[in-house]
Image (cartoon, rainbow, N blue to C red):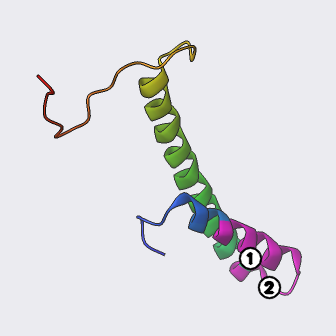
Amino acid sequence: MDGDDGLDRRLERIEEIVRILDSDLLGLDEALALFEEGVGHLRHAERILSRTELRIQELVGDDGNGLREVKMRGAEDDE
């Protein structure tokens, strides 16, 4: 899985890893490697969610009570 995989794919992989670890069919080294992979996916997912939260705050304002006008990148002025 490369570094650009989306949140949904990472969450699916984390769920898959949990199922495998719960099965008790792995040796210690294999289980540790899967656990490390899962932690990496979890950390990346947290970064994706943090960036998303910041973007939402930019769009609606810090208090969340109203929308702020946000100029689209590359959009031409209407004037």
Which residue corresponds to the image point at 49% horizontal and 31% vertical from the top-left?
56
Mark 1 and mark 2 residues within 8 Å of each other at the beta carbon:
yes
The answer to whether 13 is drawn above or below residue 62 in the figure is below
Q: How far is the residue under mark 1 from the one under mark 2? A: 6 Å
Label 1 neighbour load within 10 Å: few <14, some 14-19, many 20+: some
Q: Amino acid at mark 2?
A: Leu
Q: Nearer the viewer, residue 73 or 42?
A: 73
Q: Which residues are magenta?
A: 12-30
How far from the left and from the top, in percent, is residue 2?
43, 72
Q: Is residue 25 magenta?
A: yes
Residue 46 appears anywhere in the view: yes
Residue 10 left/right relative to 29: left
Q: Describe the element under mark 1 as helix, strand or loop.
A: helix
Q: Main secondary structure of the magenta part?
A: helix
Q: Where the C terminus falls, by quadrant? A: top left
Residue wearing tag 1: 31
Q: What residue does disc 2 label?
A: 26
Query: In the depicted view, which residue is nearer to us: 49 or 72?
Result: 72
Q: What amino acid does circle 1 point to?
A: Ala
| Number of marks present in the image shown | 2
